Image: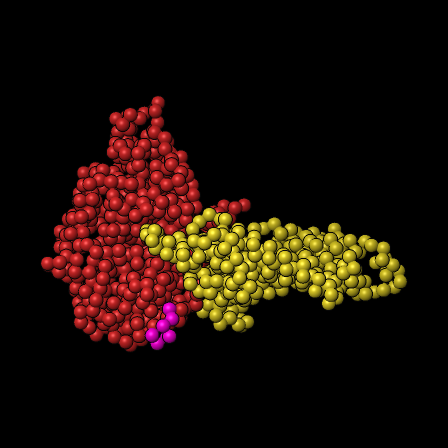
Amino acid sequence: MPFRSMKNFTARAAFAGALALSAQAPSAAMAQGTLRIGMTASDIPLTTGQADNGGEGMRFMGYTVYDGLINWDLSSATKPSDLVPGLAESWAVDAADKTKWTFKLRPGVTFHDGSDFTADAVVWNLDKLLKNDSPQYDPRQSAQGRTRIPAVASYRVVDPLTVEIVTKAPDATLPYQIAWVMMSSPAQWEKLGRSWDAFAKTPSGTGPWKLTLFAPRERAEMVPFKAYWDKARVPKLDKLVLVPLPEANARVAALRSGQVDWIEAPAPDAVASLKGAGFTIVTNTYPHNWTWHLSRVEGSPWNDVRVRKAANLAIDREGLKELLGGLAVPATGFFPPGHQWFGHPTFKVTYDPAAAKKLLAEAGYGPNKPLKTKIAISASGSGQMQPLPMNEFVQQNLAEVGIQVDYEVVEWNTLINIWRAGAKADISRGVTGINYSYFIQDPFTGFIRHLQSNFAPPNGTNWGYYSDPAMDKLFDQVRNTFDKAEQTAVLEKVHEKFVDDALFIMITHDVNPRAMSPKVKGFVQAQNWFQDFSNITIATAGR
Amino acid sequence: MLLYILKRLVAVTPVAFGVSLVCFLLVHLAPGDPLSAILPADATQATIDEMRAAYGFDKPLPVQYAIWLWHVLHGDLGVSIATGRPVLGEVSRAVVNSLILASVATLIGFTFGTLFGFVAGYHRNSILDRVASAISVFGVSVPHYWLGMVMVIVFSANLGWLPPTGAGPDGSGNWRPDLEHLRFIILPAVTMSVIPMGIIARTVRALVADILAQDFVEALRAKGLDEVGVFKHVVRNAAPTALAIMGLQLGYLLGGSILIETVFAWPGTGFLLNAAIFQRDLPLLQGSILVLAMFFVALNLLVDVMQTALDPRIERA
């Protein structure tokens, strides 16, 4: 039996077993004030600053041990998450020269090792990512961070609490880019013999948590940094423990046996039994999109807006949500409903098969001439939710209105390579769409990388070779609108155009589910890929 | 004997070379890009090219193999792409953890396998034989990862007696054979032991039954040897074949089990291989496979030598 089939079989067998044996969970003694989290990652994310392992890595090892000059506001579950001052108290672009930014740093901030955070440290950290010949240049961190700050051209210390960053061209999205850069301690790196390997074992940032134990692939432990500059975010817990548990059933078992208090991404088929056993399932909308990114190369059927709209109207998103045990938010646009950039699109993304058939007929398709096409999907993958059953569901929906889809099922890494190579590349095997899940937390990851015409491969990841001068003009406006409210208004226009032109097939959003013991108190799940663990406490009674 | 060992050592050299070639080619011919694991999905081509050159993936495959083999011969298995840590360190830690698990599983599997085999062989067609045979057939047939899951549900999730994952309350770094750590090993070790137990029980049963039916046993009894004496002869005659089977099983156990170690999040070689496969971490993958393959080669050598010591006819053959 192939390994993947065995995994599926294993999951089914375990689920069946869990159903049969889900009567009661044990009460296990727990350390008071210690929160133990089962992550989906197979290793402790990179501890030196720029974490790896995607969004999960930054969530647990980025914004915990470190800060950026700009942070994300993770304090609310009900409003969209936005940027807030971090190690920089304020930032502003030069009125005369829109490429010149000044960052005023927060005074009195120290790293975990006691050294001061100053403008020199900011420049040192940017060199760590961008300056290949600097002593502290770290290829591993650079691989994670360099791509995130494409606008940065140069930077310099103005005074001990002021840094100037110059961009290659005027770019109002710079604050979103800077929020990716984590500040490691130069003093600690020097103290440890200028070794990032040594630094990885005893890292030092300015974040609310200090790493005290790093056991590769097994465990990381953090304690509160009592001298953290933001007193409201000094952690209340005694200790935070991270355990890599990549296997979904192992995570559920660890939670149910009381070995951990919290697990990331419980499998949808385990949710009912976990709820039944008294565990809490926490979800929230966040900037994630599970979509079909469409090809716009010559000959693609998706070049006709009527066909794109028809496909969008053919999908029963509520049915899909039911298939996922309720762990999804049906798409009404490219961004989740309620997002600050959603705007007011006129095209309503709903389930209307009759309207879909009508549009297809107008486009020249019908029962005697069905639209036949091929889409690349993966069998699994980070953020891809449950790609096989979900795509089978979508395939059935589309077949009902006259769109016959064949799937080119590939392994997740192959799909990433197809996505990088573009729709015209041989590796894409003539598919007219690609099922992909997107991190869409800022203007670049949300829109620009997919849709700006000069980001077509190999220059970027505009996989479908979409090109529309009107959209390019909007992106220019985004980059040149430095007033936050005005920029938001432009981003609303981008999203309205996206939806009204039905650029992708907008299907669903993940809800970032996590399951936790009822004794975990005070967690607020922000509408963000990253989360704040500072206000969490562990109740002494209960499970 | 010394000459025999030397001859076997010489014979092992091309095998080891072949193993290194096969494991290098296998991991390189598999689909997937090793750099996908460490680069953000939207990394630019320049960044990808830079990293490819940094890890030497831009060189022709034979050159990559030659460089890798040269380093391996000098005791350097390279650096993991995903973690940046030396492969030798990663594999060594994992091997130690797998050895701990394998030792306990071996103790359980070999003890009960031999016991059931002898009981069944001595009492053919009796109720004892049927029970012992049923247990051994169960051991061979049941998918062990499924058994592991069921045991986790019963003993961890529902009864709360044993922890379901990990190698100790604070990881495997400070592992010691105390009760707190042994609690972590029970479920994976029992799960891991069922297959060797079943195979050994069946083999030993067949051997014992076969030996007991031979004329020399009748002759021993006719000469007045007591049953303990006969038993010693049976053991001595069954030992070479049983030992060969045990050697193979020990090899499998020491190699770790991807499924069991993943189910129980046991930080051994199987867990490591699983992570390396999913992350396309080629240096880690080829380093781990090479070390595990060398285990098999070494164990086979050891078993051959032990068999020869027990039965000198093998050396002459």
Instruction: Name the quadrant of the N terminus of chain B.
Output: bottom right
Q: Which residues are drawn in magenta?
A: A190-196
Vertical comparison of A404 with A293: above or below? above
| Residue A192: % across, % down | 37, 75
Q: Depth check: give the residue in front, B14 or A73.
A: B14
Residue A159 in picture, x, y percent from top left: 18, 71
A295 lies above or below A286: above
Q: Position of residue A290 (x, y in %)?
A: 32, 45
Left or right for A405, reference B137: left
Q: Residue furthest right?
A: B223
Compared across the picture, whether B212 is left or right of A416 comes to right
User: Which colour represents chain B?
Assistant: yellow
Q: Quadrant of residue B117?
A: bottom right
Image quadrant in which you'd find residue B39: bottom left
User: From this viewpoint, which residue is outermost toward the top?
Assistant: A368
The magenta stretch spans residue A278: no
Q: Quadrant of the C terminus of chain B?
A: bottom right
In the figure, the red chain has which letter?
A: A
* B8 lies above or below A479: below
Q: Nearer the viewer, residue B26 or A511?
A: B26
Q: Residue at x 47, y 52 (%)?
A: B60
Question: Does residue A194 show up magenta in the picture?
Answer: yes
Image coords of residue B181 (percent x, y):
51, 69
* Residue A133 visible (yes or no): yes
- Rendered residue at 37%/69% (across/down): A196
Residue A515 in view: no
Q: Nearer the viewer, residue A425 or A527?
A: A425
Question: Image height check: is A190 above or below B8?
Answer: below
Residue drawn 53% across the image and 66% down it? B75
